[in-house]
Image (spheres, rainbow, N blue to C red):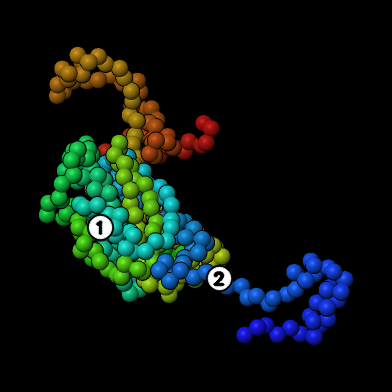
Amino acid sequence: MSEILSQEEIDKLLNAMASGDSDAIEQTPTNEKKVSVYNFARPSKFNKEQLRTLEVIFDNFARVSSSFLTGYLRSNVTIEVISSEQVTYGEFNNSLLNPVVLSIIDFSPFKGSIILDLSSSIGYSMIDRMLGGTGETLAKTREFTEIEITLLSRVMEKLVERLEEPWRQVCEVHPSLEKVETNSQFAQIMSPNEMVALVTLSIKIGDVEGLMNFCIPYIVIEPIVGNLNTKHWFSTIDEKDDGQYRPFVENHLQDAKIPVSVIVGKTNITVDEFINIQVGDVIPLDSYVTSDFKVKVGDLTKFYAKPGINKGKNAIQITSIIRKGE
């Protein structure tokens, strides 16, 4: 059916024809409606701000996890967020090469699971460190044994526990490890056409580098996807800063364990003297019994003290505090 023009538009058109103004004729309004393109095969579920907020969440997770793994594996571990994007679950699953280390994580209280994908090279390196090795990976990949999967499950459980704190600014979650799979075919937790947010992190253990991917389905976090924005993030921080945060931190700091050592004295001896030290030998020091000993808290010299006995045990009595700049 042809478009019906209003009387005003007809008058303008007649005037333009009479004056010979072709531009005015061409600019006659057509009342076209703007239509946005929607891809039914690959619908957009996450906007850029939501993906950026996920990066912030996992940046906090990376800092916490790198500190934990450094102590747990007794090796320098670095974790950094590389990128975040939305893909279909089928694309994510097809990119996996067996053997893999897939941790299926129950994302309670939400219905459904998320997936933590760890490079097999990093998995081999973790196992080597836990068994007393140097953290080297295998030159040729192979299937993980049952014992190796059990060892990896212990590490994954610890990492999953560290997801709770970074997500707290958005909502309260209680993630738990369901199982660890080494074959991607056994990790079909949803339809291949479902959209997921894929957050990629780089992880380095010693000299071994690899990737850590978090696959977060939209249908799992749909109830709180509106909270994935910086405005909600900072407003949540302000709400929690109600005067109770400082005492909370102070109480936890008071329970922190720190090493304390006393420098009784120093001396220099030869390697030969050190090797031939026997029980009963006396080593002269550069201090006296009446001298004030230095007390170190961590690596910082903080107090002066005198030696003594308390309830039958060696002890020291603090005599003064070393102020900053002394």
Q: How many marks?
A: 2
Does residue 47 sit above or below 320 in this rendering?
Answer: below
In the image, which disc is placed on residue 21?
none
The residue located at (12%, 51%) in the rendering is 145
Mark 1 residue element: strand
**Residue 174: horizontal and vertical position, in percent?**
33, 68
Does residue 37 sit above or below 287 in this rendering?
Answer: below
Q: Give whichever of discs 2 and 1 has the lower sequence position.
A: 2
In terms of image quadrants, where is residue 299? Answer: top left
Does residue 265 sit above or below 251 in this rendering?
Answer: above
Query: In whole angstroms, how far apart are the C-alphas of marks 2 and 1?
Result: 37 Å
Camera-side residue of 117 and 18: 18
**The N terminus is located in which quarter?**
bottom right
**Residue 226: horizontal and vertical position, in percent?**
49, 71
Camera-side residue of 292 and 99: 99
Marks 2 and 1 close (CB-CB < 8 Å): no
The residue located at (36%, 43%) in the rendering is 78
Residue beneath disc 1: 102
Q: Is disc 2 surrounded by few (<14), some (14 to 19) or many (20+) residues within 10 Å?
A: few
**Residue 233: horizontal and vertical position, in percent?**
52, 64
* Amino acid type at mark 2: Ser
Q: Is residue 154 visible?
A: no
**Residue 17: horizontal and vertical position, in percent?**
83, 73
The residue located at (38%, 53%) in the rendering is 200
Residue beneath disc 2: 36
Q: Is disc 1 surrounded by few (<14), some (14 to 19) or many (20+) residues within 10 Å?
A: many
Camera-side residue of 233 and 8: 8
